[in-house]
Amino acid sequence: MNLATHKQTEHTGCLMNDEIDELLADWWWWSHESAPVNSYPDCAAGFSQYRSGWRDSADLADAAEDRARDAISEAVDCCVASIDLRARIAINTEMRNRFSMAKVWSSVRLEGNLESEYARAKELLRPALEARFLIEPL
């Protein structure tokens, strides 16, 4: 494995093989971080729309980066939703295994081995990701 061509994800440092892996890793974290939580709100109802009047450039850059990451993850979410169920299961199982740092997750719904199903899922995703200009065409 050539480490110079592999990048590490921002969240865990797991090695990713290509840009599809990176997009899927960011999407997976985004989809799990943005899940609704049934608990108390983080602020009072009267202040839910309040925004601070001043921000420094670092805050604005972080906010812009977060909005860009959200937009990309939403586009990847649409692409993932368009592929078959077996491929979506393979993607989620692979991401769970990568971020748990061990091959502990599996699914009885996958007929083949996880590696081949994940590779098939990435190939199904490639045209949709290229059409949305999220990855470079081959």
Image (cartoon, rainbow, N blue to C red):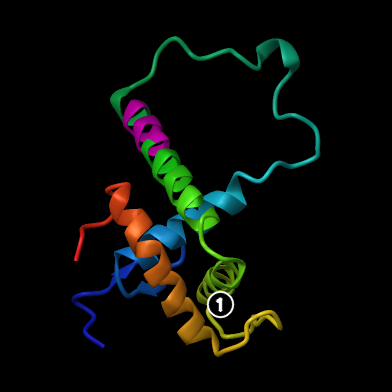
Q: Is residue 1 visible?
A: yes
Q: Who's the residue at 54% across and 71% down the image? A: 87
- Badge 1 marks a residue whose secondary structure is helix
Q: Who's the residue at 65% across and 82% down the image? A: 106
Decide if residue 102 is on the left or right side of residue 106: left
Q: Who's the residue at 30% across and 50% down the image? A: 131
Decide if residue 61 is on the left or right side of residue 38: left
In the image, residue 120 above or below residue 74: below
Residue under pointer 1? 97
The percent coordinates of residue 135 (x first, y second) are 27, 56
The percent coordinates of residue 105 (x first, y second) are 64, 80
Provide the major secondary structure of the magenta segment.
Answer: helix
Decide if residue 100 is on the left or right side of residue 138: right
In the image, residue 116 above or below residue 31: below
Residue 62 sits inside the magenta stretch: yes
Q: How many marks?
A: 1
The range drawn in magenta is 60-67
In the image, residue 89 above or below residue 56: below
What is the quadrant of residue 124 in the picture? bottom left
Q: Is residue 13 visible?
A: no
